[in-house]
Image (cartoon, rainbow, N blue to C red):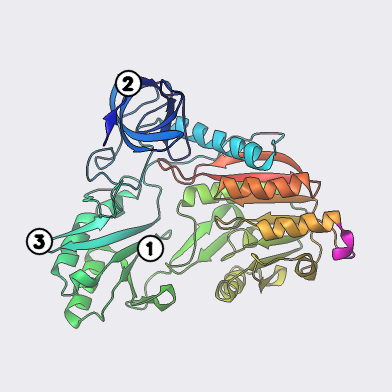
Amino acid sequence: MTQTTDWLKVESIELEAQGVAHNAEGKVVFIDGALPGEIVKAQISRRKNNWEQGQLTEIRKESPLRVTPGCPHFGLHAGACGGCKMQHLQAGAQVAVKQRVVEDQLWHLGKVKPEVLLRPIEGPTWGYRYRARFSVRYVQKKGVVLIGFHERKSRYVADMQVCKVVPQVVSDLLMPLRELISRMAERDRLPQIELAMGDEVIALVLRHLNPLPAGDIALLRAFAEQHGVQWWLQPKGPDTVKLLDEGGPQLAYRLPEFGVTMPFKPTDFTQVNPHINAALVGRALRLLAVQKDDRVIDWFCGLGNFTLPLATQAREVLGIEGSETLVQRSRENAAANGLAHKTSFVARNLFDMTPELLALDGTADRWLIDPPREGAFALAKAVADIAQDPSLAPGWVAPKRIVYVSCNPATLARDAGLLVNVAGYRCTAASAVNMFPHTAHVESIAVFDR
């Protein structure tokens, strides 16, 4: 049974963008939609021994940082889109929250305090999202097609008519796409459309559970011609993705600062926000301070997003990635950019790293680490183990500087704890990276020196 609280003073905001207060009994109350400094009431929906969780129902004192959300589908109402969590908080304050999260996680989880907190990396707050995975649902009872993110608190697809975090040209496609799918014979067997934008191409990947009949293919081609998009079809897993019609411009993005162009397939991992990615690559390389005679290792190199820019500055760059397919794609990208002579790539399971395996890749002057959400624990532990017992890798020398790009502040903090408290590094700088404005997602960058 739910119950409305008395007036509560919101003290802070936590990682999932919930306001944090304490009730009269001293119990923590998490309040969806509330902001620090506000005095509010909340409808409690969950109770545990030492905390409660609820939703904002009334505000007596409003935060000066509260703003009108930019999207009509954002909010706490039934059917609200769950793609964003912070549109009610002023954009600069969102970044401050994320900077504090990075600082707090490093200290509380890793017992690491950066010597310098760098200014967060920021960019456009609307129309920034060049990648998105939209769910598709044909609602037979209503005879309508829904395309969008899931609702805030359910698995249903939100009834989205616009989306403010994707480019306007993509937002304008949502309703035409709904009309297109409604006309297709296989409309109830098309669960997903994935967006992947390059500098010149809007690619749409259509997941289809059955083979598409000729009539549906004709509809897709007509839509592509009318709206200037490129259709890819995905009958099964990501490795089955195939371009509907060959020809046309290639899906790619540029990093102008380094004269690099990165071709990619729509299911490859690339950063959601190209504006922030370009700024992040630039900052990472400036922080790494590569010298022309340096050998650099780029761990979790993917398609070469950092490897190729590094190769424009270093003597030699080794890119290491878990997927043999991605390693091959990295080699192709290096060759296409005239950097094959300065790069090499190897496939290795980086979640099963040991001191012995680490020594196989040789000594490097500097490292760039850009892992997935799971972090780089095995890699950091191998460095720490060698620091404690050099006989595990005779002759191996740890890099002078490491730049670590993270998409999960908790795993960054865990790995930083090993690097600083066991392996003898100092965390000389860190900052948040606002890759996903209006969401609770926190990315960061940290520098380690020895």
Disc 3 packing (10 Å; few <14; some 14–19; many ≥20): few
Name the foreground residue: 181 vs 12: 12
Name the foreground residue: 151 vs 208: 151
Q: CA distance from mark 2 to mark 3?
A: 42 Å
In this rendering, which labeled residue sits more in front, label 1 or label 3? 3
- Amino acid identity at mark 2: Asp
Disc 3: which residue: 141
Which SS class for mark 3?
loop
Give the extent of the magenta segment: 389-395
> Is residue 390 a member of the stretch shown in magenta?
yes
Q: Earlier in the sequence, mark 2 or mark 3?
A: 2
- Amino acid identity at mark 3: Lys
Disc 1: which residue: 201
Instruction: Reply above or below: 159 against 207.
Output: above
Can I make out residue 311 in this image?
A: no
Which SS class for mark 2?
loop
- Amino acid identity at mark 1: Val
Q: Are marks 1 and 2 in contact (CB under 8 Å)?
A: no
What x and y, as percent, mark residue 32?
A: 35, 35
Disc 2: which residue: 6
Q: Left of 96 or right of it: where is 293? A: right
Disc 2 packing (10 Å; few <14; some 14–19; many ≥20): few
